[in-house]
Image: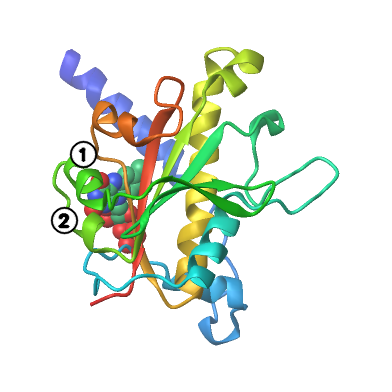
Amino acid sequence: MLKQTTIFILFFVFFIQATYPTQALPTRDSTAESALEQTIRKRRSHRTFTNTALSEEEISRILFAGQGITEDTHGFRTAPSAGATYPLSLYVFTEEGVFLYVPTEHHLKKISSEDSREMLSQAALGQDFIAEAGATFLFSAIPQRTTNRYGSRGMQYIYMECGHAAQNMLLQATDLGLSGVPVGAFTEEALRPLLYHPDEEVPLYIISIGRER
Ligand SMILES: Cc1cc2nc3c(=O)[nH]c(=O)nc-3n(C[C@H](O)[C@H](O)[C@H](O)COP(=O)(O)O)c2cc1C
């Protein structure tokens, strides 16, 4: 009896699915793509870098793509933010030290003169390419900025927002002829000491960017 019921359910599900209509989409013509579409198509994660530094211009453009201010009245940024609460902090790690991006001024605050890329790599379970990339970026968040308004759901908003900003940076890197990879595998506690407000900030996402070997 159980077998017969299972067969009936499977047949019913198959029948329902088979009756859903399909609709053809316009044929994709890759030769007629816009610059944005080409960049989206080109983006790929790469993990072998030449260990050459990124230029200041490259770093500036990648940071702006992630968190730059694009509207002066409200301070809206390149990436959307739940309720415009802007919980994210964005760091860049180079051989010259650790820097915090200040979107309102579009400048960097040097918070350490140490080359901490190896420490970052170790915190990310020994993923070597993090220390070899031209620059490695780190997103963290001060959750209260968003959870004060949205409660525990605010944490989900923060993860979503970080994804928006990270994708902007990866696409900007691709557009500059660079390669990158996002990294989510790391030990939070090992990264905290590298942050500007270690007690308040939660590390979220690493993005290594460089010239592909
Ligand atoms: C949330 C998230 C975490 C990731 N973490 C890592 C990581 O720790 N190390 C790594 O090498 N790649 C990581 N990746 C990159 C994926 O491996 C990569 O996106 C996937 O293989 C698809 O390839 P593509 O990015 O070239 O499309 C991560 C990607 C995402 C979205």
Circle 2 — which element? loop
Q: Nearer the viewer, residue 139 or 118?
A: 118
Mark 1 Cα within 10 Å, few/some/many (few <14, many 20+)? some
**Alpha carbon of mark 1 to alpha carbon of mark 2: how far?**
11 Å
Q: Amino acid at mark 2?
A: Asp
**Which residue: 21% across, 68% down?**
48
Q: Position of residue 1 (x, y in %)?
A: 18, 12
Q: Position of residue 154 (x, y in %)?
A: 56, 21
Q: Is residue 19 positioned above or below 132 on the image?
A: above
Figure colour scheme: rainbow
Q: Are marks 1 and 2 in contact (CB under 8 Å)?
A: no
Image quarter of the C terminus: bottom left
Which mark, residue 128? Answer: 2
Which mark, residue 123? Answer: 1
Of callouts 1 and 2, which one flags the residue occurring earlier in the amino acid sequence?
1
Does the Cβ of the disc 1 residue fall within 8 Å of ligand 1?
no
Q: Evaluate whether residue 20 shows in this view.
A: no
**Which residue: 33% across, 29% down?**
192
Q: Name the residue at the front extreme.
A: 113
117 left or right of 160 in image = left
Q: Position of residue 179 (x, y in %)?
A: 36, 69
Q: Nearer the viewer, residue 8 or 162?
A: 162
134 left or right of 28 in image = left
Q: Is residue 195 positioned above or below 58 on the image?
A: above
Q: Amino acid at mark 1?
A: Ala
Which mark, residue 77? Answer: none
